[in-house]
Image (tube, rainbow, N blue to C red):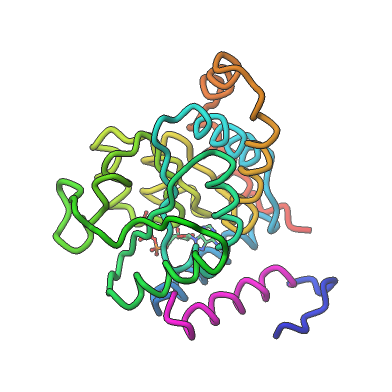
Amino acid sequence: MTDIPEDHPRYQSLLTRHRIEEGVEKGITSKQGLIAEGRGEAFDYLLGEETIPSADRAERTAAARLLLADRPVLSVNGNVAALVPGETVKLAEVVGADIEVNLFNRTPERMEAIADHLRDHGASDVKGLAADARIPGLDHERAKVDEDGIFAADVVVVPLEDGDRAEALAEMGKVEIVVDLNPLSRSARTAAIPIIDNIIRAVPNIAEHARDLQGASDEELERIVGEFDREAALAEAERAIRGGDLR
Ligand code: ATP
């Protein structure tokens, strides 16, 4: 699998599958993560496997919002850890965010395996293992977060999050940046900044925008955030998917 030629028309998609498969083998990704990947791939196929202009705008807005945040946190699940571990660590560095492991199917083994994997990719401090606070309104296991991580965060990046938890975090008043290829998912619809793009492209692109915006004033960053239209971004992605201008 690692010998896939880069000019193969499905190169990115095959590479992604390979990473998810490896994630399952290493105990990082759950079997349900495989199914989530399949669902995501179908949307990505219809998007032409590219970052559409509205997603790029959402990614720039996310970068600006993260730079303005007091306590930003990047939430990491088994798919994110398998697909973009190093890129997540780099993004956290650029915007000064914490990284917290946050699993739908939480087991101590998977929590540890993901934290180790992130450390192998350069993370110095990985949160999520203390689990000393709860998100109100969710059942016990899925409510677990770190008191000084997601619980205290003002801005949270939640890629591939399940709808219930995205809604519960929004209820807590968090500004949510959701990365999800499905513009109709509840998570995307709950987000202040929905990013309809593959996590593989989105995370490095947010980091690139953040690097570009690092010298910008708060007024400039606030202007970027203020100009973002979440409804238009969702509608544009849905139009691209339904319109299917496949190349
Ligand atoms: P909701 O409750 O929000 O409607 P769901 O329960 O349908 O979500 P899952 O089935 O858990 O969500 O799937 C996770 C979501 O992650 C799907 O919407 C899928 O499109 C998306 N997804 C999967 N892989 C990727 C990826 N690589 N990049 C971005 N999004 C992805």
Q: Nearer the viewer, residue 69 or 178?
A: 69
Q: Is residue 3 above or below residue 80?
A: below
Q: Is residue 232 above or below residue 138?
A: above
Task: Indicate yes or no whether the magenta region holds residue 133.
Answer: no
Q: Is residue 139 left or right of residue 57?
A: left
Q: In the rendering, at what x and y percent does residue 143 appear?
A: 21, 55
Q: Quadrant of the C terminus?
A: bottom right
Q: Nearer the viewer, residue 49 or 26?
A: 26
Answer above or below: position of 45 versus 95.
below
In x, y percent, where is residue 146? 27, 51
The image shows residue 52 at horizontal and vertical percentages of 68, 44
Residue numbers of the magenta segment? 11-28
Classified by dominant secondary structure, the portion drawn in magenta counts as helix
If the picture is divided into quarters, which one holds ligand 1? Answer: bottom left
Q: Is residue 115 visible?
A: yes
Q: At 69% across and 39% down in the image, what residue appears?
A: 53
Identified at 28% across, 51% down, the residue is 165
Along the line of sight, the residue nearer the viewer: 194 or 79: 79
Is 20 within the magenta?
yes
Q: Residue furthest front?
A: 124
